[in-house]
Image: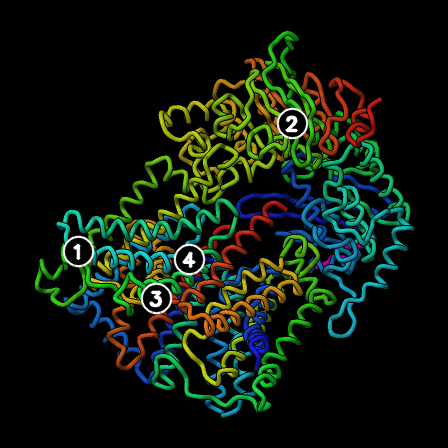
Amino acid sequence: MSAALTWLVETVRMSCPYVACALAAIVTERAGIINVALEGALVVSGLATAVGAALTGSALVGFASGIVAGTLFCAGHGLAVVRGRADAIVSSIALNVIAFALARYALRLLWDTASSSPRLAGFDAPSSPALAVVTAPALLATVVAACLVGALFTWTRLGLRVDAVGEAPDAARAQGIDVARVQLVATALSGALVALGGAHLVLDQHRFEIGMSGGRGFLALAAVLVGRHRVGATVVAAIGLAALDAAQIAVQGAMKLPPELLLALPYVAALIVVAVAARRARVA
Amino acid sequence: MTLTRPHARAIVAAAIVLLTFDLLVFAAGESPWIALSRGLAGSLGTAYGVGQVLYKATSLAIAGAAFSVAYRAGLFNVGLEGQLSLAALASGVVGARLGWAPWWLALPLAVAAAVAVGGAWAAIAAWLRVAFGAHEVITTILLNRLADALIPLALAHGLGDGGVRTGDVAHAATIPRLSTLTHALAGSAASLAVVLAVLTPALLDRWERRSIAGRELGLVGPSPDACRAAGVPVARRLFAALTLSGALAGLTACGVVLGYKGHYELGMTAGTGFAGIAVGLLGRGRPLGLLAAALLVGALQQAGLVLNASVPKEATDVLFGVVILAVAIAGRREEAR
Amino acid sequence: MRIDARRLTKRYGGLVALDDVSVELAPGKITAVLGENGAGKSTLLKLLGGLEPATSGEVVLDGRARERWTLADARDAGVFVVHQHFSLVPSFTGLQNLMLGDEPVGPLGALRPRPLRDRAERTMREAGLGVDLGARVSAMSLGERQRLEILRVLVRGATTLLFDEPTATQTRGEASRLYAMMRRLADGGATVTVVTHHLDEVVAHADAVVVLRRGRRAFAGGVRDKTIDELARLALGDAPSAVTPPPLDHDAPIALELDALRGRRVDVPSLRVRRGEIVGVAGVDGNGQDELVELISGLSTALGGRVLLDGASLDGLDVAARRAAGLGTVFADRHRFGVVMGATVHDNLMLGELGGDEAARARARLLASGASPARPELPIEAFSGGNQQKIVLARALDRRLVALVVAQPTRGIDAAAAADVRRRLARAATDGSAILLLSSDLDELRQLSHRLIVLHRGRVVAELAPDVDEAALGRAMLGASAA
């Protein structure tokens, strides 16, 4: 494969978790709930995918358990914030701590290892590597999900209510809308969306690894800021992050730069982007 | 079923914590009761265990104070983790190059390096907040990840031994162990840094009550707009609060590097920052509250290590996350941010 | 439909907001609910509209008592509250706001706005309401937002409309048009109830009136059963005496001058206020008043022009420096810019001036403010809105003040406290301060000011004497050139 094609394929591969997290962040933030627990949701859904796949030998069961776990995890955030009236940031941080620890705990318990699950079954894939990346079921599901989230906010009652609840909860309440319920539905939905990314990471690599989420759940928040919570623009920004990741690998191979320096780049980029987006929001 | 009565909320929170504990221990094939008693015995039942709890509580109390000072100004410093690790690196790097200095120069220099680097790293987030309005939660998370990427780079290229650690800190720059004072604590990691753990929250509290800047922090937190309208230098106060928070995170690092290990190595402060957030929230920023919370969390961590053979020690981290969540639910939410 | 309240009582904790109140609202009539702030008007409306449950008492529809009376029940019965605030989503279009809460949906929860839009347009024609359904609410004028609110309840089948202070921020002309529309609805058989504290409106437009005072019903009956003075006394008790400004010395030096001051939404070519002079700034809310105060105080930076205090430019000085130079500022939004909730009265009195001989200064300010109880160690939450406002004012006033800029000093506080605040302002003018008074209470402006200027879309469109007739003032506030 040519370098350009490799870069393109890697971009597609890596865009899945970014886009999934960004979609999830859009849904919760538009419902008015801060959610910085996406990284944890990515870990938990990946773990559940691995456990499901390892126990049954079926990638499909793994995928499904990942979605369920992600949904429950984020619904937990919703419950803590909406019903328990916990501070959303504290709840997010606690859930991240739980997720990271739970992953290590489960690896120790199930496979007596500190870092990585054994090799797992994946979905049947075409023999061409490029084709395999592009046709990965979790990736396709994410593409569909992006379209659905776009449609949700443009054409559906739930989307309208999520926006209303996030922007003007008192106004929504005055119209008889159960604000808490809409927020719970939104957080649970966001969990299912992140889980697409978590499942993809695991099924793509055929194993679950500590640290495989790689901060994407946090970086995706920058994409959402740049995209100003709009689905299309945010997805583009998320794909941009993936392209940056993919370029990192390509450059690293070609230029022999210290890998840590390249690892640092997306975060520097994200910091700049967050600052610029914040100033823009402040002026507007 | 939105809970409003404080007692009901506290009971639910406690029940969640206990249930999680049982689940985690059962899953590992152990009896919760036995695990509890063995954990207690191993953490508070022996002099060594107490020493270890003290060692952990030292870091936790200072980190908790670090979190509190920013929180008082309405800032949520999720970046303790990154500030701590960079500061620990700094104290290791500087400490290793102080072989020529007498202790009264070496120790302050090593501490100052840690405090300066911790503060500087937090100052980036503070600047982004004040100059651009970028939310400190997002920027400090990103700065944590950036620190994670930069530290191995620094260790591998000049600042460390080329591997995963710095050289050994000069003896003159270390903080004496408590075991040099009493043999009962032999082998435990607790050092005289424990004095810092007691002094820091107390001095901070005094500053917050007595000084103009400290008092204004507590007013800027709940109502930045009213303060701005009354001529309080809000941006300066916010900047100072977050920077001070990072500097105290740097101080935290000293107990680990200068008081215990004698060098910095990759990942050695991991988790302390997040635990500090929990201690800060639990202790509600009051000096005695911070100390009590630090001892509690320290005992929990030590108990987890004791049980590691039968129940993976990560179980305590899970439990610890659940405790943060439970406390957040039990305590009333302050005004939505 | 006839809707009666029978012995409604509402308690919030220890506070009795509404105490055993019965009213009868008849179809085809406009019934006004009159009362002071805190008299229980809004509470009555919330109970009737099903927004909150009553502590005791019941709602009776056409003679049938309803045991359950929730928001959904009220809507099913065609009873709707038309809110003044907080009920439209700013970034939504008119049509989206119309849908919200009662969305017409097809399969899979997909919205089907077309039939609703048709129905809304028909209703607009019938009721004579003009609303651009495609425009975002944030781009709509206050009047258009109100029409959208009314349209929304009509489209949902409202036959009983409960208006919550619909004219609070309107000029008289706007209010008259609104009442004309209410009359059309009533003539079509609707039950119309309107909460207000404007007595003149009640007399001019309503058929029946309910007077509430301190949570109790003070009177209910036909508007013509009582004279204006009687109604006023029922609602207010004995009215506090009017406050007048001190005599103006036309040769006093200029203390506050705005010179070509320009911001994002305001542009004031020239304005001079002498020592001892009170200049009232009239205008419909949202015509640049907030920014004007921010620019003068130094809270936001001017795009051009200068503010001069005693002839010296305040250019480049921040809020604290301007304070030190003798400028006092009281912002309209007391909760956001005035008090620090959770802090003590002492800290609130000394905000921005901590240090030095604090305790004595705080005590002196608290005594001068007239707020009670005079205990600086209490949390500010322990004080009523009126007392909080006195504390905010005391903070601005206590120093050798050259000029005071004060916005909405009596908004949302009770009549006695408002009178105290006005007296304090008049005294500050007597003591030689220049005062720029921004208020949406026209009576207050006319009472206190030496002269009035009118702000419209950020520009000064008229300068008037305080005794100008209402109609001319109203026209100027709407941007028509003053005759």
Q: Name the residue carrying label 4.
A: B78
Q: Kindly report which numbered mark, 4 or 2, lies closer to the viewer in this rendering.
A: 2
Query: Which chain is indicated by disc 2?
Result: C
Q: Is the residue at mark 1 from the same chain as the one at mark 2? A: no
Could you tell me which residue is drawn at 25 percent across and 69 percent down? Answer: B302
Q: Name the residue carrying label 1.
A: B175
Q: Is residue C100 visible?
A: yes
Q: Nearer the viewer, residue C391 or C3?
A: C391
Q: Position of residue C448 (x, y in %)?
A: 66, 20
Q: Quadrant of residue C475?
A: top right
Which region of the structure is painted magenta? Answer: C61-67
Looking at the picture, does residue C207 appear above or below residue C48? above
Q: Name the residue carrying label 3.
A: B152
Q: Nearer the viewer, residue A93 or A238?
A: A238
Kind of residue at badge 2: Leu
Q: Is the residue at mark 4 from the same chain as the one at mark 2? A: no
Query: Which chain is indicated by disc 4?
Result: B
Distance from the alpha carbon under mark 4 to that under mark 2? 42 Å
| Image marks 1 and 2: residues in contact by CB distance under 8 Å | no
Q: Name the residue carrying label 2.
A: C261
Asked if residue C33 lies left or right of residue B245, the reply is right
Q: Nearer the viewer, residue C165 or C475?
A: C475
Q: Quadrant of residue C184?
A: top right
